[in-house]
Amino acid sequence: MNVRPDMNVRPEESTMSSPTLERPKPHLSKRELEVMRAWFASNSKSEAAASLYLSLGTVNTYLTRIRSKYLALGRPAGTKAALVARAIEDGIVDVSDL
């Protein structure tokens, strides 16, 4: 019987368990974060715009910039669901915030 040296290691210490992956995070401005969170909390971009006293076009511009930053890091977020997933992965929002 062949026994590998790492067989006596507890499962949580095993090299076979998947380590937490360090994902590159985009640098988002305070206002970009604010717009993104408002959109997540709203039913529409128009509603988010109204809550922040911005135009719909301005909200769309912020969201386009945020998506571009994620895309540049190889982490595309083309839909609201994908952007929510990225924000959760990066600790920007929590599931309980949604």
Image: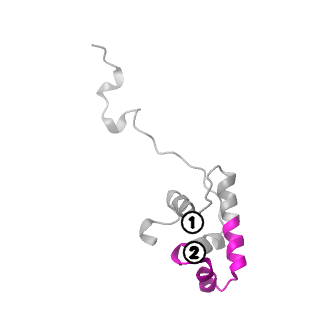
Disc sitting over residue 6 in the figure: none
Q: CA distance from mark 2 to mark 1?
A: 9 Å
- Tell me which residue sits at (65%, 70%) in the image: 32
Split into 4 quadrants, where in the image is the N terminus? top left
- Tell me which residue sits at (36%, 36%) in the image: 13
The part of the image, by quadrant, that contains residue 26 is bottom right
Q: Are the residues tagged 2 and 1 within 8 Å (C-beta)?
A: yes
Reading the image, the residue beneath label 1 is 80
Residue 48 highlighted magenta (yes or no): yes
Residue 45 highlighted magenta (yes or no): yes
Main secondary structure type of the part rendered in magenta: helix
Q: How is the image coloured?
A: one colour
Magenta segment range? 40-64
Crowdedness near tag 1: few (<14), some (14–19) or many (≥20) residues, C-alpha within 10 Å: few
Disc sitting over residue 39 in the figure: 2
Tell me: residue 97, above or below residue 12. below
Inspect the image, locate mark 2, and give the three-letter code of the amino acid beneath it.
Answer: Trp
